Amino acid sequence: MTKALLARVFTLLRLLCAVGLVAGMTFLYTRVVSVNNVTVALTFLLAVLAVATWWGLPEALAASVAGVLCFDYFFLPPIGNFTIADPQNWAALFAFVATALIVSELSTHARKQAVESTRRQRELEGLYTLSRNLLLLDSRAPLAQQIAQQVAQVFDLQGVAIFDRLTDRIYRAGPHDIPVEDSKLRDAALQGTVFEDATAKTIVMPINLGGPPIGSLGIQGTSISEAALQSSASLAAITLERAHVQEVATRAEAARQSEELKSTLLDALAHEFKTPLTPIKAAVTSMLSDGCSSPTHQELLHIINEEIDRLNTMLTEAIQMSRIEAGQVHLHRSPQSLSALAQSQLQRLAESLEGRKVTVEVPEDLPPVRVDPEFIGIVIWQLLNNAVRYTPPGSPLTLRARREGAEVVVSVADCGPGISEAEQQQIFQKFYRGKTHRERIPGTGVGLTIAQEIVRAHQGRIWVESQPGKGAKFSFSVPCAPREVSA
């Protein structure tokens, strides 16, 4: 027997019961108890009221018609005759029908409110259970799969499907496979649209937290409202987003630890390599100063000395880069004279600058700068050393400094071959070396990267201005030292 047929049978039984109730009351008043017409009318109204409250409008109307007929036939004169034309009968009929309509409507509305309130309470309890369960998911298993299982279980749905946009995978759960194509789930996530199929009782909606969708949720079943579905999608979005953020944080922490370990090992190795270079450098310098060797040996000693300097520079840059990457650059700022910083680096490069005209333009009234002298000295040395290495021997260099507002801009200009516009966007990248120079000029490609990171640590900026064939000018800015206020 189908559900529709059962519903019809139950409705017929309720109609018969409503009529039987009125008939029983009529039998009681005519055969057992003697009462006046007012009492009969009131009890019939109460019966209609009860039927309307219990069952609804159709049964109440049946009870109303039966009550009017019984009241007219058995209790209104002439007894035993249907006299509809009598105004009293019409008033009774109107009273019964109006009571049936009003009370049944109020009763139906109250029942609907009660059912809706119960449904909302169950959904709130389900959402609470879902949120609690989502907090306890196993991070070792796919979260989207667990979310789909929890939604299907908590709301007793026939089928649930979740598309995780980050992993580009679809997970299904529930006693039945939801009849939704994978393309619909992907379209809902990519386009942010809602897909609904009333025939199959399915709906697919995007999962997001106010931004672009991070996936989509599809359900099959009618035991969940749209508001509960939206809340479930939001909980799923929070869970997935939290998992994604946690995964990114875990990866970042692992990368940081790996980078720190690599930098520590590189720093240790570089120091170990530099240890024997010091006595080798001292021995070679002593042999060169004695001049007791033959010209051939002297030339070889010069080569050894240059290669030692080169190796020492590479190891120094490796140490500096490892400290920067490990976040171990701790600045000790103090007011410094830029002229003194520049002169100390020029003296350090005196041997390399021999035979070149170096112009230093630092105004006497240039204010002091608030910098770490060791690190800013590295920046100046890197720019001067690059200018020496990448320009023809004997070509002039210019070191300038000028004030611009609350900053001092330092620049090193050369008359070399210049840098193309395309390479200007890349020369500050780690390990990048110019295409035309990488074969004939030794280097590691980290000098400018080190200079850039040091300048950034000082809240400054570094840049290059150049045209092919017209030389290059590297500049960086550092803040001026604040003026001391006299007491």
Image (tube, grey):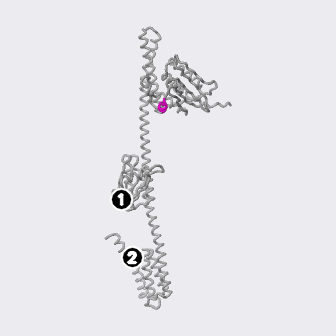
Amino acid at circle 2: Arg
Residue 188 is marked as none
Whether residue 359 appears in magenta in the rendering, the answer is no
Q: Quadrant of the C terminus?
A: top right
Seen as rendered, the residue at the extreme left is 1
Q: Which residues are magenta?
A: 420-427
From what the image shows, is residue 286 above or below residue 250?
above
Amino acid at circle 1: Gln
Q: Of residues 139 and 308, which is closer to you in this image?
A: 308
Q: Quadrant of residue 361?
A: top right
Where residue 113 sits in the image (x, y, percent)? 47, 67
Q: Of residues 311 and 322, which is closer to you in this image?
A: 311
From what the image shows, is residue 224 above or below residue 96?
above
Where residue 214 sits in the image (x, y, percent)? 43, 49
Q: Earlier in the sequence, mark 2 or mark 1?
A: 2
Would you say the residues marked 2 and 1 are in contact, meaning their CB atoms lie under 8 Å apart?
no
Cα distance between the residues tagged 2 and 1: 33 Å
Q: Which residue is mark 2?
A: 14
Seen as rendered, the residue at the extreme front is 469
Q: Secondary structure at mark 1?
A: loop
From what the image shows, is residue 376 above or below residue 147?
above
Q: Which residue is mark 1?
A: 158
Say few, some or many: other residues with alpha carbon within 10 Å of mark 1 (under 14 / 14 to 19 / 20 or more). Answer: many
Whether residue 422 appears in magenta in the rendering, the answer is yes
Q: Quadrant of the N terminus?
A: bottom left
Q: Of residues 402 and 241, which is closer to you in this image?
A: 402
Where residue 172 sits in the image (x, y, percent)? 35, 53
Q: Quadrant of residue 73?
A: bottom left
Where residue 9 sits in the image (x, y, percent)? 35, 74
